[in-house]
Image (spheres, coloured by chain):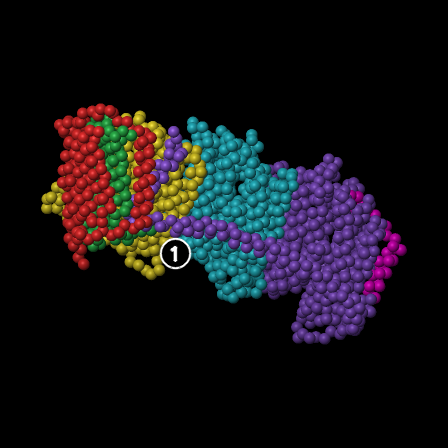
Chain colours: A green, B red, C yellow, D purple, E cyan
Amino acid sequence: MNVEPGLFHFLVIGAVLFFIGIYGFLTRRNLITMLMSVELILNSVNINFIAFNKYLWPGTLDGAFFTVFIIAIAAAEAAVAIAIIINLFRSHQSINVEVAEEMKY
Amino acid sequence: MSGSTVVFYLLGLMSIVSAVLSVTSRQIFRSAIYLLFTLIGIAGLYFWMDYQFIAAVQIVVYVGGIAVLIIFSIFLTQQSGEQLPEVPVSRAVAGALAVMAGLALVLVLMDRNGFTGLSDPGPAPSISAIGEKMLDINGYALPFEVVSILLLAAMIGCIVIAMRKKPQV
Amino acid sequence: MFEYLHLMKSEAMVLLIIFILLFIKLGKGLHNDTLLSVVQLLLLCTVVISFGFNDTGRVFNGMFLHNTLIGFQKGILVLAVYIISLVCSNWFRQTEHLAEVFVLMLSALLGMFLLISADNLLMFYLSLELSSIPVAALANFDLNRRKSSEAAMKMIMNSALASGIMLFGISLIYGLTGSLDFAQIWGQVKTEPIHMMAFVFFFAAFAFKLSVVPFHLWTADVYEGAPVPVTAFLSAVSKAAVTFAMVNVLAKVFANLSGSWYVLVVALSVVTMLVGNLFAMRQDNILRFLAFSSIAQVGFILVGVSGQNEQATVATTYFMLVYVFSNLAAFGVAAVLLSEAGITRIEQLKGLYARSPFLAWALSLGLFSLAGVPPAAGFFGKMFLLMAGASKGNYIFIGIATLNMIISLYYYLRVVRLVFTSPDKDVASLQVSRPVIFGLGICIAGIIFTGVVSWIYDHIQSLV
Amino acid sequence: MNTTNIILIPLLPLLSFILLGLGGKRLFGDKAGWIATVAMLISFILACGVAMNYFGDHSDDAYVSKIVFNFPWLHFGNGLQINMGALIDPITSLMLFVVTFISLMVHIFSLAYMKGEDRFHIYYAFLGLFTFSMLGLVISSNLFQIYIFWELVGVSSFLLIGFYYQKTTALAAAKKAFIVTRFADLGFLIGILVLSAQAHTLDFQQLMINLTSTEYASAAGAFMGISALSWGLALVFMGAAGKSAMFPLHIWLPDAMEGPTPVSALIHAATMVVAGVFLVARLYPLYSIADVGVQSLISSVGAFTAVFAAVIACTQTDIKRVLAYSTVSQIGFMMFSLGIMSEDHLGFTASMFHLFTHAIFKALLFLAAGVIIHYVHSNEMQDMGGLSKKMPVTHLVFLLACLAIAGIPPFAGFFSKEEILLNAWNNNRSIFFMALLTSGLTAFYMFRLYFSIFWNKPHHDHDHGHSKKEGSWFELVPLMILGVGTVLAGFVPFGEYVSADGKPHHVNMDLQFSLAPVGIALLGILLAAWMYFKESTKPEKTAAGFGVFYKAAKHKFYIDEIWLGFTKGVLFNLIGRPAAWFDKNVIDTLVKGTGSATQGAAEGIKGMQSGKVQQYGLYFLFGIIIIVSVFLFTQGGR
Amino acid sequence: MNLLWMVGAPLLTGLAIVLAPARYARLIALGGAILQMALVMGLYFSFTHEREVGNVFPLLFEKQYQWFPSLGFSLHIGVDGIAVAMMMLTAFVVVAGVLVSWRMEHMKKEFFFFLTLLAFGAYGFFMSMDLMVMFFFLEVAVIPKYLFISIWGSGNKTYSANKLALMLMGGSALILVGILGLYFSLPPESRTFDMAKLAETGIGFEIQRWVFPLVFVGFGVFTALFPFHTWVPDGHSSAPTAGSMFLAGISMKLGGYGCLRAATYLMPEGAREYANIIIVLASIAIIYGAFATMMQKDLKYINAYSSISHCGFVLLGIGMLTKTAITGAVFQMVSHGLMTALFFAIIGMVYERTHTRLVEQMGGLLKVMPFIITAMFIAGFCSLGLPGLSGFVAEMTVFVGSWETQDVFHRTATVIGAMSIVVTAVYILRAVGQVAMGPLAASGEGVEDARWYERWSVIILIAGILAMGLAPFWLYELVSPGVDVIVNQLAGE
């Protein structure tokens, strides 16, 4: 493959980040770090959008706008998540995900 | 191999490496910082694609907002400096397997499909154009409103949840 | 301008209520009971408005689509919310954040409206988030219950992951088709591997929200932990909304892949029914039991969806209407029992009949309807779903579905039996407040009449 | 006029049954008996009337059988239909007379005999039911009607045997009687099916015409090489054998003596048990054209039963059982005489004649036995003896009856038995000699009975004062009437009236032929006198002389035990128990199994719901990956 | 007359029971039952009258109402002789059932409500001419049975109730798949659930080949087809008296009627295809059920198993495919309905007095309760096929009909069936004899005879039995045309 950075490079970066994020989500046991992984996932998606927008469909702005809105949503999501986490910390005295396994089966 | 290429690879490398570090480091505070680097790297990539506006948003919202939020919450919830618990091997292996499989699948398919982008990417959108579109009733006015309502709702939710008084025990 | 208002009347109404609530909150506030009755009144108006005067049109450059069917579906959703506001009124009265609860719930409702009307991936994504994030917050509103916060955490985390994966899919779709507009995407989707992958990533979000196996695992925990109204909202309203959206999207956007997603839907439906039933069999917590039973119901909805024709749309809409009545009857009773008698386990239902015949009957009717036993409306709902599915001629699948009906009958009847067996010791009879009676009355009426009165179905048919 | 009479004959008893059954004690109290008796009397008179003006008109030399009335009772889709009708021909008229006559006697007798019974009215109701069914049976105009009433007499016999319902033995006997005959009726039923399918009709006359005509008689529907006709007739005979207690289905009759004695007299001596003979006689034309195998089946079964029962009778000590076995033996006579088909059809006439006479004297014997039993309060011989002075009337009539059954001229039995023997002599010598032996045995055991009741040892009153009266007039008058009958019945020119082809049939008796039977009968009597006239140890000695044979005979050759072994061993243990076991353990287990399997599955997969967020995520991811890869392998293509 | 009254009457009764105070429940129920009986009688007479004036159209009082027209349903109702006979049976059993449970105290309101609901289902089922509507009514009648057993039942009631409900639902699941297959196998423009239309358009053999077994077995489960009969003993024995009467008297007839109407009538080729299998299963059920009965000790189990045996005759008759045999099957349904209902009613009364259902713990009861035991004798004689009672007529018709087919297979089946009359005699006499006769058992000390309501319920059923047993021709006249239609269908005309 050619070294000249193009669409595919960005997609690769996006995919890699995406799965790194998922890996983090699956393995980290601290809720906040899990949240960070989620942010990674969202960012990777953003990269895809921008890349597609730039290299495939430059005519429209859909990708760019999508990215903007994703960022906004991510903020909201993070806010709510952190609020919930803090509450969980209050009730469980920890933000380790394993403390919240009362409900099962 | 032009300079821009080098810059691109540096940015990409930076974001990926720091992402890996941020999901593996056992110092929660450090991993937050690594996340910050990743975000900046990605912002850099946006600049590289000269989507300045997006890059700016990225910096402002993520670096300035979310990352800070996360760090605060770390302070709130965590005695910083204490190690994160060890990842159980089984989970790590399973996760790694799933992730590898997924990544392989995605990359293979992408490669098969071979997204051959345009050789000469079109001009990046001007910020004014974005602004125009954003509030145009035939543009993105509705999504804009929706997001605003979502933010409002999220805000209210956070307030209620985070501002609860201590349980009377 | 009027056109906008006319097409978006339900949204406008909901928005209005939200603002009224905000003003009341910012003002000196109101006593819960008055506030609650105000909200109920407004919701009632919304129900009327949403069911009435619908017509077709698209605004915001095709980001918002409205037609008679969608209007009817919105009507179902807001009706469900209204019933919830009635049957869970005990909980609402006791909470100290009534206004906020309703603001969040209604904004989620708004999100669902937009979700159904969405004709554009961006709008779709946004409204999906709008309909889930506030609910996640709501799940935490029993602020002092550990389980509540656990539930909220599980929900927000899972939905974050789900939306991330869906976004990845969307990004691919965008990349492959170059558009976010459903109409244009429809032309572009091909039966190529990467398209399918994109589709699956995208579909996973539906699967997650509908809690289709294997994406269902959050459901039970959240249902158990969250406050009862929120659970009811999740199980009735959001399920209905997502179903409508899914039928819409699958038919509109991925018609070209129909051959593939038929197989997918059939497979998932079988697994979902099976797993849902098997888990429901062994639950002893009422809410968890209802959670798994609703999972099994989703499997059944998928049977209808697999029909891939107009009748599938009609059948699913009809079934969701019935399902709302039946499920809310069950949840309403559960809510009353929880708040009045602290009953959470199924064994404690023993002798319910002796304590309150009304609740006993409401619960039994709801469960009968869920089990699909005539003359309850659920019978017709399932019947039509099966007919929609059978139109493909895949009778093995239909046979499996009916077998699952039998399994589900087993555990539904188990509950009913407990309800009617006489209690060991004589127990105090339960007081049921007027709004609850009213709400359950609506459910019962719905359960009885939606089925045997055939013009309701014919009406829906005429809307398509 | 005639028709209504004939309908009334069975209907009156039915009426009394309904009246007494529903009215019960409250309405009638002990008037019940009178109501029934009066009804019976009327229908007896009617029956006589019918018989007279049937035999009365000699329009032509042959008696034609006429259908008096006939109405459809039930259609079958295939043109077959069951009618309810009345067929009048010589044997019908004969049976009408016999049944009503004996029944009347028994009704009158019971007025005194059953007095003070708790369920007096029920008793008479059942008698009415029985008489109705029996009369319906004899006037039946088609095969199915006869089957219907066949079952009805069966059930009324069940009810009457079990009349003393609190005695376990009575219950057992009733059940045995019903089930054994039921088993035989299975054959009868299938026989009916065969014949009807063959002839496409059930009506007797049509049946004769169809089956005797060539195209049916041709071995259509032959099975295992035997023509359907013969199959059908053989199976029907099975039913007849069951009802008439032919070997090996005779086992129920002796036990049936648990019922009240008058009932034994009516049902188990005179009327019901000869229904089998009647049935065969009814189908005589068919049997006469059937394969020889069927005919010889009938004759040999009859003959063997005659000897067999007679032998057992010699060893029994319960007087009613002796009488029962003698009944079996006598019916054997009738049966084999029917079975021996000769071109002059003497056997038919003889058999019917014997049926007629036997009905009278056997009823007499039973009623007399009833009186005796009431007198000594026991059925056992050794409790009796020396009663000749105590009860002269009974003594006299009993003696007459014994002479009659022994075949001593000029009593009734003599004539009929003569004809039977004559027929046997003409056509089948082996059977003739068996019959001869049997009549010797008959004379022996009857007089054994007679002597040990009335002479033997002097009667010592081991009971206390009461019932020293021989019996009330209600009991004695019937005895006398029957006694007269016993004397006179033989002189009825029977052949003139009843014969196979309806034409008058003259039997010529020659004295030298009858020397042998009479002689052997006298021999038997003398032997009995020698052994039993005075109390002595001769009987024991003789019994010892016979040794194991005597023992076997005393135990009725263990037939009961064999049957019992069959039912208990085969039906219950080999079929019933396994069936029940299979149902409980196999089929039920399958059902339970599915249930528990489902439960097990539910338990098995519960680990899926582990409560761990990240594991949920893992499932999520794996789900997607699997689905995608499956797609790639199935559709994905290219 | 308008047939809707036949479903309307129970419906209104049910409503009245729900609304009225509990102490009136039984009165209302009785009134409703008598009203239904009157209506059915009216139906019978107007039906026969129509026939007399020469209305030969197979289906009378036909009406068709819109009901989910877009899906090809329609509330198409009408009756032929068979349906009328079945409805008369239902009416008899309903009245008797209400009377028997006159002293019901525990949750009486619901009890009588469910009773009327069952009646509603049964009437609707028998009169419906549309597969889906038929199915609807069939299912309506299932759940009340479950509740009957699990609320008012006795013994191992939970198990029995589940078994019954699940097996019956399993049966109806098969039926559902079958009729859906039937529906979608037709070309789109002619898709319908209307039996009349389906019968005349006809169904391709390939479809019949796989649909017939589903539908037949589905209904067969209801009427205790051999391997699927195992719900019968437990269900009947655990149910309360009226419940058992309904189960055996009506519910099992739903199955038989369905086999006849929905399976055989609509899919004659299928019927011919599978007739031999049906016959084999039926003969097994007859003889096997009889022998299994012989070993039972509990009166209710005895009657339940004997029901398996007797319903075998229904299936045998259907399997034989001749007119007589099918007529016999219908007769057997009516007869068995009345007879077994009577039996269960009596068992209930005996149990109520002696507090035991084990045969060996009873004896000599004839002395203390002559009325009940006499009725028991009548029921027993009816079940062993005594002439003059209904059982005889039915069984004979079946036998004659099955004997028509002249080959060894059919005749062997017939003989096997006929053998059961002996076995029946054995177990009936064992049971009834033991209960009624012999020395009075301790359990029978100081009990009194039937009360008025029990007497009446018994009398009503016996009246039915006698009416059929003494004068069967009217029943034949009633049923025959309906059977002709089915037979012609079978003959492919």
Mark 1, other Cα within 10 Å: few <14 / some 14–19 / many ≥20: few
| Residue that mark 1 sits on | E106
Q: Quadrant where the N terminus of chain E lies?
A: top left
Position of residue D450 relative to residue B132, above or below, is below
Residue at (35, 29) in percent of width and height: C191
Label 1 sits on what residue type? His
Provide the chain ID for the residue under circle 1: E
Dividing the picture into quarters, in which one does residue C13 lie? top left
Q: Is residue C441 above or below residue A93?
A: above
Q: Locate the C terminus of chain E by quadrant.
A: top right
User: Whole-percent x and y of residue D273?
Assistant: 70, 54
Residue D357 vertical position relative to residue D533 in the rendered view, above or below: above
Q: Please state the horizontal and vertical placement of residue B16, each as a whole percent of the image.
A: 23, 39
The residue shown at (78%, 62%) is D402
Is D523 covered by the magenta stretch? Answer: yes
In the image, farthest residue toward the front: B1
Does D499 appear in magenta? yes
Residue at 76%, 42% in the rendered image: D289
Report if residue D259 is visible in the image.
yes
Q: Nearer the viewer, residue E35 or E144?
A: E144
The boundaries of the magenta stretch are: D497-526
Identity of the residue drawn at 44% across and 32% down: E184
